[in-house]
Image (cartoon, rainbow, N blue to C red):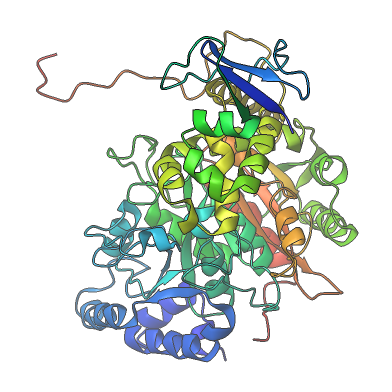
Amino acid sequence: MKVFQASSGGTRYRKRPLFFTQARVPEAPVLRQAKPLSMGATIQMTEEEILARAAGFTAGLKAHPKEVAEAIASARRIAGAFKAPANETAEPMPAYAAPISAKGSRA
Amino acid sequence: MKALHELSLTEASAGIARRRFSPVEYLDALQARAEDVGGKVNAIVRPLWDEARAQAVKAGRRIPRSGPRSALDGLPVGLKDIIDIAGHPTTCHSRILLDNQKTADAAVVTKLRSAGAIFPAKLATHEFAIGGPAFDLPFPPARNPWNTAHHPGGSSSGSGAAVRANILPAALGTDTGGSVRHPASHCGIVGMKATYGLVSRRGVFPLAFTLDHVGPMTRTVADNALLLGMMAGHDALDPGSAAHKPENYARQMKKGLRGLTIGYVRHFHEKDQPASAEMAASLDAAAKLMGKEGAKIKAITLPSLNEFAGVNRAILMAEAAAIHGKWLRERPGDYANLTLRRLLPGLFMRAEDYVQAQRRRRELVAAVEAAFAEVDLLLTASSMDVACKIDDSEAVELTYPRQARTPFNVTGHPALTMMCGLSKLEGLPLSLQLVGPSFGEAAIYRAAEAYERAAPWKGLRPAL
């Protein structure tokens, strides 16, 4: 199981058993503690716990841990399932269009 | 002579106009059919026969006095239970919305009602049009009329089952990743996902705003063109509605296939998602028949099916999560487990991935548009396999990715699926898909009607 450690400075990704070493998965979200911990204090969280918390799904994780793990894997697969667009500055669909002012508008 | 419940929309319309039977007699025959076979296919989640009967009585008085409002006057149309009808709940086949009482009709229902249509039933769907055939919901899943042990396709499963079981001559479905065309393919009927924005989605529970379509499901091509003509039209209150005037979509019918160039996209079912041998052979046979009827058949290559599917999933997941996020967080246990598993990935998608998918989507649209510079229509597979057993969860999971329908939700082009044979082993429908340029529905119906006329499948029906 992948393990994350959260410290007062934020959460860093660890791969068991190498606690207290540098992260290697850049997309893992940083977890901010609601209550600041004292310097050096740590808590351990799994990848699922961190991502579920970032998604606001902490309570759901307890009841549906298998589904959350599957969903995280699925989301990563989906993101990698199509080619990166050729032009990274191209306008995505659908383009925003300014609203047409209604008749009688003062605009 | 056909029994009343076997009549198509156009046949019933003609029968009423010639006073061979009344709208009430026709509706009563359908209700009797529903009582006879409805329990086998579980298509209806909320019967509205009494209300429909009152409307049929009014139509029966009105038509002899002042003529029909339209060819649909007094005729019944079923509604997938994510489409609002005033005075009844829209449950989305979910316990979350069992009390979701609606006070107004969806825009498409308003249009059909003004044409004289009546609405005798709300029909089964996959939960929120995404779940799958689940057994832990307030209503049972619909079943395939050709063999009730099999999946009818989804998510407009009740619409497909009701139409093919001759409980209703027509129904509305919705299509975000193929959900009109999947049940149409598995049930052996005609399903159309028209150009994005041609039919208003106002009053229809959304799944993914930029992919959602409402579409007609019927037993014949002519019926489908008739129904779409009554549904289409600009709706200023639907932000995705196209500023396109409704047309007579049947106007090119009977012109035949001569003069049309049809691009046959073989790599979808030969390389990208290899189809069963029988499905592939039926598609080749359909292409051959279209060629014999006068169409020029040309090989066309599009981006891989997996590219389209990836973009569809990324967009669908992210948009659906923005709709279901609150319920997913507060009451995840109220969804069927299958629905929960389908929706949850959206909570873990990154915003960047959604935007990249929408950007890649523009490139995929351009690729399909380029194909339409060379051909009038595209012929592709719809499903890669016939309907699987409904209680085989592994096979059910496979039925959703093994298809070629999502490309045209991504691009918004109109696409119709119809029967192109019966499997020898299971006796279940085989299917094809015809795709047109944006707002090219009339040309699709022209080709579909010519194929329907030339092929021997039209008279086939399940022995329920």
- Relative to B293, does residue B39 appear above or below in the rendering? below
Residue under the image location 45 percent in, 55 percent down = B228
> Closer to the camera, B99 or B359?
B99
Above or below, A18 against B463 in this view is: above
Q: Is residue B144 left or right of residue B80?
A: right
In the picture, the quarter occupied by the C terminus of chain B is: bottom right
The total number of labels drawn is 0
Residue B326 location (% of width, % of height): 39, 42
Q: Where's residue A69, x and y in %?
A: 66, 40
Q: Residue B363: in sight, yes or no?
A: no
Left or right: residue B341 versus residue B167 is right
* Residue at image point 56% right, 19% down: B352
Q: Position of residue B83 (x, y in %)?
A: 38, 58
Query: Which quadrant is home to the N terminus of chain B?
Result: bottom right
Decide which of B408, B132 is in the foreground and name it. Answer: B132
Asked if B9 appears above or below B410 in the picture, the reply is: below
Residue found farthest to the right: B277
- Residue B46: in sight, yes or no? yes
Say above or below: B256 vs B11. Answer: above
- B346 relative position to B29: left or right: right
